[in-house]
Image: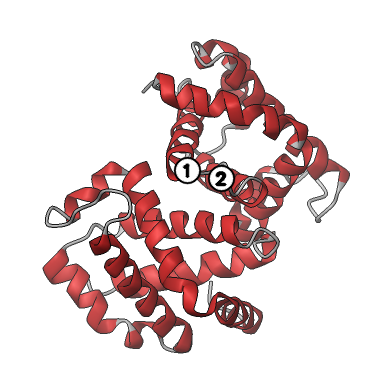
Amino acid sequence: MSLTKAERTIILSMWGKISTQADAIGTEALEMLFASFPQTKTYFPHFELRAGSAHLRAHGAKVVAALGDAVRSLDDVAGALSRLSELHAYILRVDPVNFKLLSHCLLVTLASHFPADLTADAHAAWDKFLSLVSCVLTEKYR
Amino acid sequence: MALSGADRAAVRALWRKLGGNVGIYATEALERTFCSFPATKTYFPHFDLSPGSAQVKAHGQKVADALTTAVAHLDDLPGALSALGALHAHRLRVDPAHFQLLSHCLLVTLARHYPGDLAPAMHASLHKFLSHVTSALASRYG
């Protein structure tokens, strides 16, 4: 799976706006994930997960920063996220189904923050990009 | 996970807010489903699926009416959706996995139009409601 030229253009053009609200978006997406899909909290027994917690904010920022790395290397997402891919495969071992849940929450959060930008085409492009990132993060599982 | 009193109250309140626009949002959700998940178009070979299609708009209104019926019968979703479930199972033969794709697109659509309203708690209640609708439809598949 690779992104078309049109899809890359959409993602790159929106990223400028997204990066200015990166922390808020990451935090909100994670809050949504834990509220709607409580089973995902099992991966964070060491975190304080209440809304507004410092752990949530820090981790939300990390998630969006990683997406930023992928956006800056759309030609080689696997290379850009190689270390993260190993982390998820050998240490974190997050069940792949959960990436879809986080991707969903990220898309809903993007829709809230950028309603006019998230046209049907943009929605499809972001869905594809997040699927690609999820694929890369789980490709070393076996 | 059953719908709690708080979930029901939240869904009913949001539906009152949506008022007569549910059809518009369901139509947009359908358009996004076809755009992001092209395989879903195979269920509509008889439709014009181009943007702005009158057939998609009419179908969106049908979906909206069914959801509104569901909101009015939160105490008995399987009963209220029994006929629709049978239709999807035996005649339309829609893979139940696709209901979740439409749910996802509906949530993104609502987040675009009501950015302040889709906070994590509301999203959780809505997602739960849509999951129950999906389960009720899928329960007739056996």
Q: Nearer the viewer, mark 2 or mark 1?
A: 2
Residue type, numbered disc 1: Val
Q: Give how far apart the Cα atoms at labels 2 and 1 are.
A: 16 Å
Percent x, y for residue A87?
A: 62, 22
| Quadrant for the C terminus of chain B in the image | bottom left
Q: Is residue B20 visible?
A: yes
B4 left or right of A20 in image: left
The residue nearer to you, when weighing B131 against B14, is: B14
> Closer to the N terminus: mark 2 or mark 1?
1
- In this rendering, is residue B21 above or below A71? below
Q: Which residue is mark 1?
A: A97
Other residues around mark 1 within 10 Å, as few (<14) / some (14–19) / many (≥20) = few
Please say if B76 is above or below B134: below
On the image, the x and y values in percent for residue B52 come to 32, 55
Residue B111 is drawn in which quadrant?
Answer: bottom right
Is residue B142 visible from the viewing direction of this image? Answer: no
* Cβ atoms at labels 2 and 1 below 8 Å apart: no
- Residue that numbered label 2 is attached to: A107
At mark 2, the secondary structure is helix
Under mark 2, the amino acid is Leu
